Image (cartoon, helix red, strand yellow):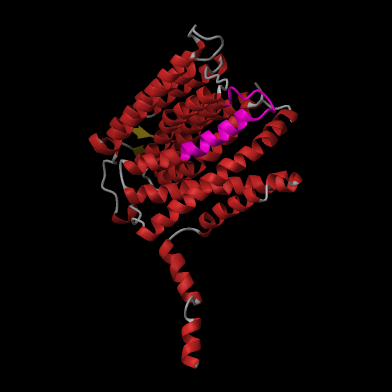
Amino acid sequence: MPEQANNVDAIVPPATQRALLKRLALPWWTILFPFLAAVAVLVSLYTMGTVGTIGASVVLIGAVLAAVHHAEVVAHRVGEPFGTLVLAIAVTVIEVSLIVSLMLSDAGDASALARDTVFAAIMIIINGIVGLCLMAGGLRHGEQRFTLRGVSAALAVLTAMVVLSLVLPNFVTSAPGPTYAPPQLIFVAIVSLFLYLMFVLVQTVRHREYFLPDEELPADSHAERPSVLTTWTSVGLLLVALVGVVLLAKGLSGIVERAVLDAGLPLAIVGVVIAALVLAPESLAAYRAAKRNRLQTSLNLALGSALATIGLTIPSVAIVSLILDLPLALGIGSKNITLLILSMFTITLSLGTGRTTILGGAVHLVIFAAYLFTTIVP
């Protein structure tokens, strides 16, 4: 009998449970938040007053970060070029779900929300993230180097996509206002997706050497490939997190929009919040890479995020707007065009030699501060 009892107790002893968590190699919060998101949706947490709204918002943020983490795990397992697409698609699902949920709400005119979110993401990346990385890396390591050919290729594609998506709509005449006519919108969606896929092909297959650092990285610089158990666990949790994010965003969309409008703030701030939330994990990864003197990795993360934001988000939002017959204004105003020209011109100069210092980072951070200030005080 004692031996039988020991066998029963040995089914799931604490040591085995800890070993299982160790085998999964997943942070505890990435497992917790997808389930919290599912529970929050089932009980409609966002309808339970102010406390419920705050709780649902916290769960939504945690689910977004958890979803991106699980997408990175799956991407690392499947390898390139499919890994890059897995991560980009997961992030796009999150971003588009947040945008469309707000576009469908009746709290205010959200026809320009996709434009505001995409433009905010571009400004956050090329000024906020790049500026912070250049500043952090320069303070710790002085002058940093990177492979110029890869960065130049990324900036060329980014410039074309930004102008076609956010500037050209102001000057076409087939539709009134800063909008595209349906055939024009379809064309821009197709070419944006085409350019992004071509960049992924060049980055991961045809010319991978353009995006690798000149010096050999140490043996411990690459994360160990996740196990099959960890990968499938991440796949399941990723799906749960994505469903939770989409449904929570739908429930919170009207509340968030009304709160911004009631506070007397421009609706464009909602786009800044969405972009910052979606870009948070990759921003942190880029910052850490720069501090470890791996500026090439940092720039790959930052510029790759910018390209995915336009190359996948614009086509997705365009399809949704055409199917649901939602108004979609893409053209940015003259103030933002000025900031965009200044940003693209500055980043071309600061990354044009293959070497960077803290000065370039300081300039980009000032431009980012000007963007934030003029968004709040237009």
Q: Main secondary structure of the magenta part?
A: helix
Can you name the residue that lies furthest to the bottom here?
A: 1
In the rendered image, residue 93 lying in the magenta stretch gets the answer yes
Instruction: Please say whether residue 160 is visible from this viewpoint.
Output: yes
- Check the image and name the residue furthest to the top: 173
**Nearest the eye: 246 or 155:** 246
Where residue 6 sits: x, y (%)?
A: 48, 87
In the rendered image, residue 298, in percent from the top left (x then y), is placed at 40, 40
In the image, residue 270 above or below residue 227: above
Quarter assignment of residue 375: top right
User: Which quadrant of the structure image shows residue 191?
Assistant: top left
Q: Is residue 23 magenta?
A: no
Residue at image location 54% in from the left, 45% down from the top: 243
Q: Which quadrant is home to the C terminus?
A: top right
Q: Is residue 97 left or right of residue 137?
A: right
Q: Quadrant of residue 263?
A: top right
Front one among 243 and 260: 243
Count up the numbered dots: 0
Residue shown at 35% from the left, 39% from the top = 296
Q: Give how far across and how far down residue 224 sits, in percent.
A: 34, 57
The answer to whether residue 349 is visible is no
Point out residue 269 in the picture as x, y percentages from the top left corner.
Answer: 62, 30
Which of 165 and 243 lies nearest the eye of the viewer? Answer: 243
Residue lying farthest to the front in this orientation: 323
Residue 320 or residue 124, whichever sits in front = 320
User: Which residues, given as a range, are shown in magenta?
Assistant: 91-113
